Image: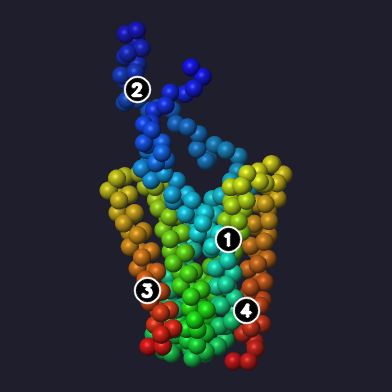
Amino acid sequence: MAELEASTNQGARRARPLSPHLQIYRPMLTMMMSIVHRITGAALYFGMLLLAWWVIAAAAGPNAYANFERFIGSLIGQLLLFGYTWALMHHMLGGIRHLIWDTLHGLEPAERETLTLTTIVGSIALTLAIWVIGYLAMGGPR
Amino acid sequence: MSRAPQMRTPMRRVRGLGAAHSGTGHFWHQRVTSAAGVVLTIALVVIAISLLGRNHAAAVQILGSSPVAVIMLLFIINSAYHMWIGMQEIILDYVHEDKLKLLALMANTFFVVAVAAAACFAILKLSFGV
């Protein structure tokens, strides 16, 4: 009894065992996509600055809009916009996947893998489709 | 004995609030704004593509037109609330030090409100033609 008390008293100072965290599990697709969903969400959070700059520049006048166009047309701007497009599509499809899971559908092992793969393939396909349509639109009459 | 001991008072049960005193409100709001976000995101992509390669005057005309302006306002406000909840969840997951957590939560609110207000103001300015 005294021994037990001594050990529990020490317990506060001793390093307690922790519950297993991410690094102990084998990486799985659904797990990676859960992480990517959070990362794309955080990226879109700051990507909102890009959208804000766009509409504020339009409201400010031709010079401000020209500055925005010059930036977004540059290599860095194009990379940012491409990344923003993909993050937006990935987060949207990932969100739809989560909404489906919220209804308790698609949770079987094969189903959830299919849904997760659809998010990856779908987000890349949608991003490329948007950019192809975008470049076609750019080629049209100005 | 089969029933778990009831720790909450009847009032607490009726209000449906847990230890965080906020219940599942944010959880549900995140789902509502995500559903709206799907529709609004598709609309935003269409609007953005329609503006490509056009000059400033055309951009002003399109962004300021009533249906586009309303969609843009809805996208900005809906996204702002969605990203405020999302970033709050990230902060609560990773920032454990009390003062830093409080500062991060405040910074989240300030950032979201400032960006959304500026973007909404720009849309309104375009639409009212000032």
* Quadrant containing the C terminus of chain B in the rendered view: bottom left
- How far separated are the C-alphas under marks 4 and 1? 19 Å
The residue indicated by pointer 3 is: B118
Q: Nearer the viewer, mark 4 or mark 3?
A: 3
**Residue at the spot of label 1:** A92
Residue drawn 57% across and 63% down? B38
- Discs 1 and 3 lie in a common subunit: no
Looking at the image, is mark 4 or mark 1 earlier in the sequence? 1
The answer to whether any part of residue B117 appears in the image is: yes
Can you see residue A69? no
Q: In the figure, is residue B9 to the left or right of B27?
A: left
Say if labels 4 and 1 share a chain.
Answer: yes
Mark 1: few/some/many CA within 10 Å (<14, 14-19, 20+): many
| Badge 2 and badge 1 in a common chain | yes
Asked if marks 2 and 4 fall on the same chain, the answer is: yes
Disc 1 sits on a residue from what chain?
A: A
Q: Which residue carries the number 4 mark?
A: A134
Number of the front mark, 2 or 4: 4
- The dot on residue A107 is none
To which residue does mark 2 refer? A11
Mark 4 belongs to which amino acid? Gly
Identify the amino acid type marked 3.
Ala
Q: Name the residue at 53% across, 58% down.
A: B34
Q: Are marks 4 and 3 on the same chain?
A: no
